[in-house]
Image (cartoon, rainbow, N blue to C red):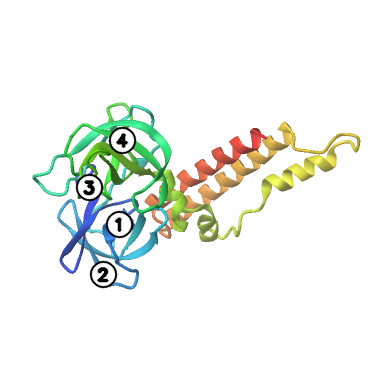
Amino acid sequence: MADGQYWVDIYQQGSHLGAGFFITTRYVLTARHCLGRLRQDDDTIDLHCADGEVVSGRLHEVRADADLALIEVSKSKDSAVVVPTADIPRMHDRWSDPYRPTSSDPYLRGSVACPAIPYRCEDGSSVEAIQLGCEQALGDYSGYSGSPIERRDEDRGQWLLGILLEQYPDRESPERATGVLFAATIGEVVEQFECFGIGHLRRVVGLGPAPARAKEDRASMTDRQDSTTAPGPTVASDRISLRTRFDEASALVDGLEEWVEKGRLDSDEVRIMALQIARSIVENGISELSR
């Protein structure tokens, strides 16, 4: 598969449903609305890959409240899938979409207007989204939904930023779309699907549910304070909590890498899951230190 060509066309019983892309070698990510009323107990889905290979899959999970869906590949591709490393978008990043609905359609590209904002989709679902400015004034962007949004540059290489969901309509002529597009962030994808969550990772490596470390650590510090001192969290206790989380996360990632070496886990899945671990540590750390 050529560099960057990890996208697929999704078909069922000969009908083209829309676009998607490999987020790991096991899962294909797409927009839920591309699948219409397709259900998890429906027939096999055909995934027409960019290199011409066709693989089958089944609907794994649908997130109706986020316009996202995962398709699980029944059998791995014969050729390797190279998925770009996920990254967080930045203001004014140059973005591009490696997918186009047909050979007579243009490739889309532009710049990031807002890297991460709450966005309410047309169907009422809500996601953390990237607001994109598109340079190709097509008027109608139908057919591009479900495709990957990425950044490529000479210094940092190729990075996966999000999944294109929809276009903002022209307020004066609603039947016409503007050049403003919205894509769900990869962070949103990781949050939405349980198979990419930290809880799932812990179960996979046999660590059990995560303990309430922050609460326990603060209680421990409070017990050691003098009885005349007002109880409450301290900077020291927060640092202990963050240190504990970091050590636990490091042990978890080490365990996952061992399972990859044994062939029990897919390295791409672990890469996506590690993003969730890092994001959790950062968000919890900010929360702890802002109290």
SS for callout 3 = loop
* Residue at left offset 45%, top offset 53%: 192
Q: Which residue is mark 3?
A: 144
Q: Which residue is mark 1?
A: 33
Which quadrant of the view contains residue 174?
top left
Tell me which numbered mark, 2 or 3, is placed earlier along the sequence: 2
SS for callout 4 = strand
Q: Nearer the viewer, residue 164 or 266?
A: 164
Instruction: Say which amino acid is labelled 4.
Output: Leu
Q: Is residue 23 above or below residue 149?
A: below
Q: Which residue is mark 4?
A: 132
| Side of 280 relative to 121 (left or right) | right
Residue 161's tag is none
Tell me which numbered mark, 1 or 2, is placed earlier along the sequence: 1
Tags 4 and 3 touching, CB below 8 Å: no
Q: CA distance from mark 2 to mark 3?
A: 23 Å
Which quadrant of the view contains residue 282?
top right
Tags 2 and 3 touching, CB below 8 Å: no
Q: CA distance from mark 3 to mark 1?
A: 12 Å
Residue 44's tag is 2
Tell me which numbered mark, 4 or 3, is placed earlier along the sequence: 4
